[in-house]
Amino acid sequence: MGLVLGAGLSMVFAVMGDGRMRAGQVLMAGYFAMSLLLVLRGVDAVATWVTIRLLRRGTEGREGLGAWGQMVRGTAVVCVCLPWVMAAVMIYRPKVSPAFDPLQQAGWAFQSVEFGAMDGLLVSGWWIPGAVGTGKVTGRTVVVAHGLGSNKGNQLLLARRLVPAGFNVLAIDLRAHGDSGGQLATLGIRERFDVLGAVRWLKREQANGAGRVYALGASLGGAAVLAAATEGTPEGDAIEAVVVYGTYANLGDLMNETARDRFPGPMGWLLKWIGFPLAELHSGERLRHFDIAGRMTRLWPRPVMIVHGTKDEFISIAHGRKLFRDASLPKDAIWVPEGTHNSIVGDEGAAAAVEAFLRGARSEPVVQR
């Protein structure tokens, strides 16, 4: 059953992420599913044992005790197993490789590269030189980071106006995604090390093409680039401008909102008080304490642009507005009318504004549109 579930999950995420299934990841997903099933079976076994003990206590009122026993069993399964599965799915997803490379997608020449994140994990990326010619920018590179469950190919759309405009692009797979190492996502906390590793690689291997480095991220990728740029390291300080699409301001607030708005009644309570702590146990990180908005002033005097959809169904626009409010000048914002969490990536008006913003990125105030 674990292998069947693993194969099914891999297939679902390959379809959702426009990616390609990998045999090793299918087996890993199967192993992970087996572990979950064993935990669930263990909880059920303990609850069953308690039920039997209750049934064996005396002869009078046995039917009532049996009902109480079944209630104990059902409560244990729901209160422990359901949050356990929710927590696991939150941070573990089968990795799928990009189905199409930049040459196949957009006709762009590229080089596949690998480098170490700042904590040593292997990161996979595509180095895409910008177009050259009159009116093109030169010597500028944008690190592009995708969202949760995506990969460097799935959201290469973010760079569709940048490469033709002359920007070099380094599109990366964040850890636990695509062809990079790791199996557990930490929702931006450790992913910042992947972005910092990308900047270090650029400065070492592409010094001429990366005289100025910018960062562009969507959702999870946005949290990663903001955290990287505010880390206070030479690599973080080298990021001269940041653009984020549909990114959360505070992970704890987002988790509470998700439990309240997307899971009715007791399920939301279980997710908030059991599921999220279990997710922290799985990841080894204090996820609910990750505050991106609290870091925004550290970007000064570097410019930042916040892009958010007014109809974002996963991360409300309140998060985007808080990021913008807490950032120091220079800053800019694009609120995409009727934009959803995924649709804003394809919004042409936002893409044009991002290109213009990066063309003029400088450490002095810009006017909000």
Image (cartoon, rainbow, N blue to C red):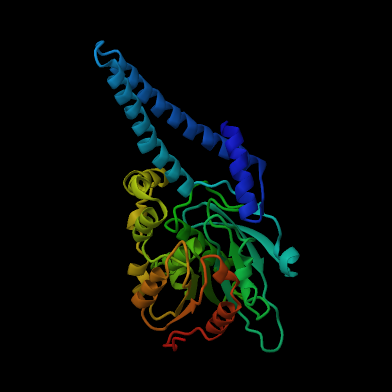
Residue 28 appears in view: no
In the image, taking residue 91 as reference, residue 137 lies left or right, namely right
Vertical arrangement, residue 104 with respect to residue 94, above or below: below
Residue 248, image x, y percentages: 42, 65
Q: Nearer the viewer, residue 241 or 41?
A: 41
Which picture quadrant has residue 323? bottom left
Q: Nearer the viewer, residue 211 or 310?
A: 310
Vertical arrangement, residue 122 with respect to residue 84, above or below: below
Residue 82 appears in view: yes
Residue 211, image x, y percentages: 56, 77
Q: Quadrant of the N terminus?
A: top right
Which residue appears at 39% of the width and 74% of the height?
321
Residue 281, image x, y percentages: 37, 43
In the image, taking residue 75 as reference, residue 137 lies left or right, namely right
Which picture quadrant has residue 10? top right
Which residue appears at 36% of the width and 55% of the height?
260
Residue 287, image x, y percentages: 37, 53
In the image, taking residue 367 as reference, residue 107 lies left or right, namely right
Q: Nearer the viewer, residue 98 or 47?
A: 47
Which residue appears at 37% of the width and 22% of the height?
48
The tally of labels here is 0
Which residue appears at 59% of the width and 48% of the height?
95
Which picture quadrant has residue 328? bottom left
In the image, taking residue 100 as reference, residue 47 lies left or right, namely left
